[in-house]
Image (spheres, helix red, strand yellow):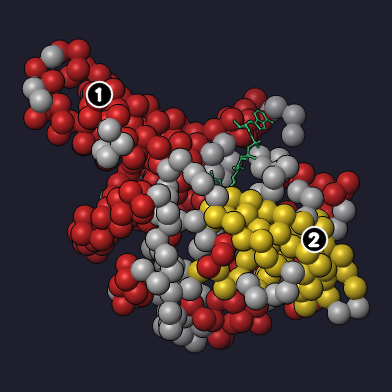
Amino acid sequence: MIEFRVDDETRARIEATRELGRSEFRPAGLEADRNGAPLPPDHPFFARCLARGEGRTRWPGPGGGGEARKPPSIVTMLLLAEELAYWDRGVIIATPGPGLPETSVLSMGTEEQKERFLGPFLAPDKPRWACFAMTEPGAGSDAAAIRTTARKDADGWILNGAKCFIGSASRSDWILVQATLDPARGREAQRAFLVERDTPGLGGFKIEKKMGLKAYESTSFTLEDVRVPAANLLGGEARYERKAGFKAAMQTFNAGRPVIGANAVGMARAALDEALRFARETRLLDRDRVRDRIEAMARRVRKARLVCLRAAWLADQRRGNIVEASMAKALAAQVAQEATHLGLELVGIVGASGDNLIEKLYRDVKAMDIVEGTGQIQRMIIARNLVGLPR
Ligand SMILES: Cc1cc2nc3c(=O)[nH]c(=O)nc-3n(C[C@H](O)[C@H](O)[C@H](O)COP(=O)(O)OP(=O)(O)OC[C@H]3O[C@@H](n4cnc5c(N)ncnc54)[C@H](O)[C@@H]3O)c2cc1C
């Protein structure tokens, strides 16, 4: 029996998120979108995030001795992710914290690495960020094709290469950089390195222009003879023997797929609500054809929501969910694009003015189909698992 029952505490958290979304997240997202630039690190929004206790690590502290915080269920996390994205998905990613690579450091990092890299996020003295750098100008979907090299010498490692579209890279304290010992050996030669931001040779940071999600920076950078101590190899030399570098990267992606799906559902709901409000005000709802299209879209959004929740529920039961996680992301991202498309059609010329929420959502939502494995790649994963497509 599948059950998505929400307890009183979760309901209160979703309610609080809604209030925060309305008063903080949506205005910050609109501000960044209209300025066409990410929120700067010293923006008062980030100081307020910190004051509310956001931007912290899930790591409990040295020896597990810190304040033990029971992790919420994955279903709860999804419901919160949906609600947050309803208000502004770009702002969620802009929010300080150890971000995408935290899961890899928690599961694969040594105790010393957790203390050194997650420790500053226990009670941050200022907004702090970290990020995960896999994508390169010539390696996106095919993550095994990266060309950033890692060469070992007597003192540690020397990294050379270039990364692109990395979230929050220029403001991060450290970057989890995926590199290869030998590009010809594919995924088994990959290693993950914790590279501190002020390491010599790490530079050329350039914030990319993008069509949506402008609240957070997507940044390219280069690594030129970047010397990284042996102690910064994720998991240490012992893990290196077990060839776990690529696994670290895939773990980061697998954990995120249903969350991206939930984000997309939140954005689809926002577009539908806005379209409905407009259609009511302008009496478009008097037309059967318009009512039909909104009803059909609402059904599809609910379906996507249920698929996402099922993927999360399976994860909560510690059951395999690779197919469901990929279905959740592929379906929800597609439905969200359709919902914003419908919304834009309904608002017509008002949307074309470039100062309309649906027009912003239309631009924001495309990335949900790209990040953490494109829709095509999700469909390949599903096919591979269901009908045995070659690996
Ligand atoms: C907003 C945003 C934020 C991002 N943040 C990060 C980040 O923080 N860290 C990071 O490392 N990366 C990040 N990325 C990069 C993202 O992971 C890549 O864009 C994504 O993996 C796709 O790679 P690509 O853009 O090079 O497209 P490509 O891989 O070149 O794909 C182009 C098209 O071909 C299709 N395609 C590719 N291979 C196949 C195949 N075998 N079969 C069928 N179709 C295929 C794809 O589906 C796509 O439609 C971000 C991207 C965006 C847009």
Residue at the image point whose x is 40% and y is 31% from the top? 337
Q: As rendered, which of 146 and 33 lies closer to the eye?
A: 33
At label 1, counting other C-alpha atoms closer than 10 Å, the crowd grade (few under 14, some 14-19, many 20 or more) is few
Q: Quadrant of ligand 1?
A: top right
Figure check: 278 above or below 174? above
What label sits on residue 180 in the rendered view? none
Q: Is residue 134 left or right of residue 97?
A: right
For label 1, the residue is 348
Asked whether residue 300 appears in the rendered view, the answer is no
Tell me where residue 31 appears, x and y as whole percent: 31, 54
Residue at the image point whose x is 78% and y is 64% from the top? 224
Q: Is residue 35 left or right of residue 378?
A: left
Q: Which secondary structure lies at badge 2? A: strand
For label 2, the residue is 160
Type of amino acid under label 2: Asn
Q: Is residue 144 left or right of residue 305?
A: right
Type of amino acid under label 1: Gly
Residue at the image point whose x is 15% and y is 13% from the top? 288
